[in-house]
Amino acid sequence: MNKFKKFLCVGLTSLLALSTSACGGGGGGNTSTDESTVNSESTNVEITGEVEFAVLLAGYGETPYRELAKAYMAKNPGVQVKLRFDYEINSNVENQVNNGVNVADVYSVRDLTQIINFGLNGKAMNLSSMLDTTFGEGYAEANLPVRANLDSKAVSACTLNGKTYCFPEYSSVTGFVYNATLFDQYGWQIPTTTKELEDLCKQIISDTNGTVNPITYCGAAADGYLYLAIDNWLYQYAGIANLDEFYDYGSAELFAPTSKISQGKQLAHENLVKFLADRNDGGYARNGSMAIDHHQAQGELISGTSAMMLNGSWFENEMSAVLEQNPGVEMGMFAFPEMSDASGNILHAEGYTTQQNKRVLDASYGAYYFIPENCDNKEVAVDFLKFLCSDEASIIYTKYTNAVRPVKYNLDPTSADYADLSFFGKSVIGIANSCYLYSAYSTSPLAIDGVVSLYPKGSYWCKLVLQDPVTNTPESKIVEDYNYVKGNWARWQEEYGI
Amino acid sequence: MEDIKMNKIESFEASTAKPPKRRGLTIKTKKLAFAWGMLAYPILQFLVFFVYVNIDSVLMSLTWVQTWRETAIFPTFHFFEKFFRDLFVDKLDQVVFALRNSLLVGLNDIVLVILSVTLAYFFYKKVPGRNTFRIIFFIPSIVSIVIYTMVYKYMFNPTIGPVSKALQWVFGWNESTTPLWFSQKNGIWMIMLYCLWVGTGYNILILGGAIANLPEEVMESARLDGAKMRHELFLLVIPMIWPTISVSILGAVTTMFTLFLQVELLTQGDAPTIAYLINSKIQGSPNSRSEAAAIGLTFTVVATPIILIVKKILDKVSDSFGF
């Protein structure tokens, strides 16, 4: 019995010790964190030390970050860049920064509000002074202030009361991903209006005797990316000035059924139902595709059973394994065709504006770089972040991710910088180069606190409209949203001092 | 003979000699160390996962970070007010659906207990193929939920799913007219069906164990008195295993407030429950977490009396059965 007690005591003590150490160490107990070091081969010496860069291990994989680290160390051979790949960085960062546990020097995380709150609590570094410094020797943009090389809107989005706490890693470029091999085979042309898109869908059915579905819904995991079509069609319809006015959230009437934004939502949803409804229901989407998952849907696009789907710049990396098994298949992406009437006349809201006659596309920011105040290597971290804001780093990033950065750099897909890029990658940066990328952000307290958004009741309703367009009409949803905002507006004004 | 005598003397001396004094802990200290060793882990668990978590939740629910003013308000009932406004005034879909779905899940678990008792009884009655069925029912309880939800979804896939295919054949549906099983409209019913499918195995194991331990003499005596199966089930088996059934029913009531993983894996949040709503908000900004804490505390206040009342009722039934 005594032996049993001893055994039990030892067992319990060990368990206690293990659980205690598990609570205290690491980044929130996540076992998926991988730490690796990239070696430098260059000879320039300016800054010495090390910098740890914590990033999300997701669709873009490790390669772009490894290449960025390599390039930085080539410029600064005295610096060692340690990369921390973490599947759960977006949740682990909270514990790491707030409690000073396992803090990295530079982070790339998704939640802007979280970073701003770190900043307000003195946990994220104010980068304003770094942005006012100039690029040093060895940079193509030497002597240029860092701020001047960045998209001003991207800086504003990360700035609160004059303090900039972070900078966006990339802008999401989305569109219709298509099977370029199939398009080449049948000589199908890229549509620029919804009229042309509808003609194309009909042509696909006719040319293939209905064996190829013009469009497939992209699985339930991200609501088939329906919202990408809605937002892009809305942005193209509304234009820059109307969107700027809307995102100021100055009045409840911005949500009125007669407002420009609501009209745009109405048209966008009508187009969504027209194109994404099942073919059996008079649409152009694969029958039953709303019930299949994204792996199956994307696989069908690659195999040529379907010709197009709503997706984004990450498609190629996400499906790389399947694409490798289909070496003869080439994928591409084209920008959302502009909404038009039956004659092909493009529809724009009153007061529509754009720049250089470019199509306005939605390009929300993906992740944000920031430096924690309690990191160990602040000086090197600042220099590394400056490097990440350079043309060189941006080109490397784009080459390995197909994603574009809110930095003023070369995005010409025909340039030598992108000679090695796949057809898909070139088509993505071609969209970024030829369209105006509008990234929505707002300085309204209502938006900062998440009280209102494009869909003020908290969620998109495009999927509901597509699933049951008779019960869930866009008109009824717009009225519901408006009544909600109108009913709460006076209280919000009082609470938020607007 | 002399040798034997000498050995006996040595052996006697050895047995009567006082053991050498052992330095170290006294028995009392050892007992204390053992007791604290036993208690330390549960106490730490209690302090961290109950005391700390609950105090933190209360503080969090009363904190409103006003980023745009670079300040935080404490204490405030802002998030409690918001939740009640969302539920009763604005009737936000996600909140109303979450509450409705949670209630349905609770009721479904009561059905699950009834189904499990019935099945456990049939297995006890040695129906043919019972061992095979027992394994079939139990497999979902030991396979990862991620795999089983995937299998379940594929069963209802309109293109390749055997269940959907069979229903298409019966009702004349095609791929487009086959209901979207995991949508906002149908998702909760599919979650409930999944819970019945997966939950029975575990319950059968627990309840089956309780039934198997019933004294055979009692059952045999009932049979000799002419008791039929329904009499045996309702008048003997259920009363005698009532304490086990009580635990299962209490578990069912708490599931109402805790089920969320199935919602994510089967419907990607289209058919939310209260637990899913809370979980989705935890992953957001500090204010979102405060909102989650406020919702969590509100439901703690709601759930506690419900669970206590159910417990009281179950105890009363137990008393009536003579436990």
Image: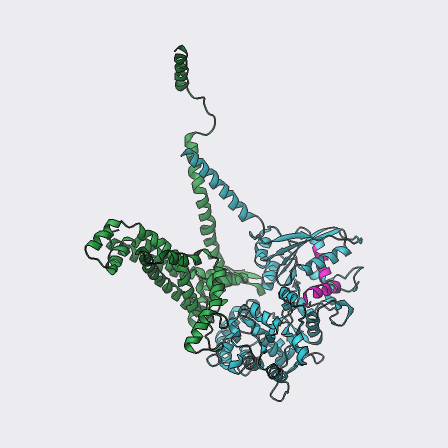
The residue lying toward the viewer, choosing from B30 and A214, is A214
Q: Position of residue A453 (x, y in %)?
A: 55, 72
Q: Tally the marks.
A: 0
Structure colour scheme: by chain
Instruction: Compare residues B122 and A379 and report the one nearer the observer.
Output: B122
Vertical position of residue A179 compared to residue B275: above or below: below
- Chain A colour as displayed: cyan
Above or below residue A39? Residue A300 is below
Is residue B243 shown above or below B73?
above
Is there any visible trace of residue B76 in the rendered image?
A: no
Query: Residue A391 is drawn in which quadrant?
Result: bottom right
Residue B162 is one of the magenta-drawn residues: no
- Position in image of residue B280 (x %, y %): 50, 63
Q: Nearer the viewer, residue B77 or A422?
A: A422
Q: Residue at x 54, y 78 (%)?
A: A255
Is residue A22 visible in the rendered structure shown here? yes
The part of the chain drawn in magenta is A381-402
**Chain given the colour green:** B
Q: Main secondary structure of the magenta part?
A: helix
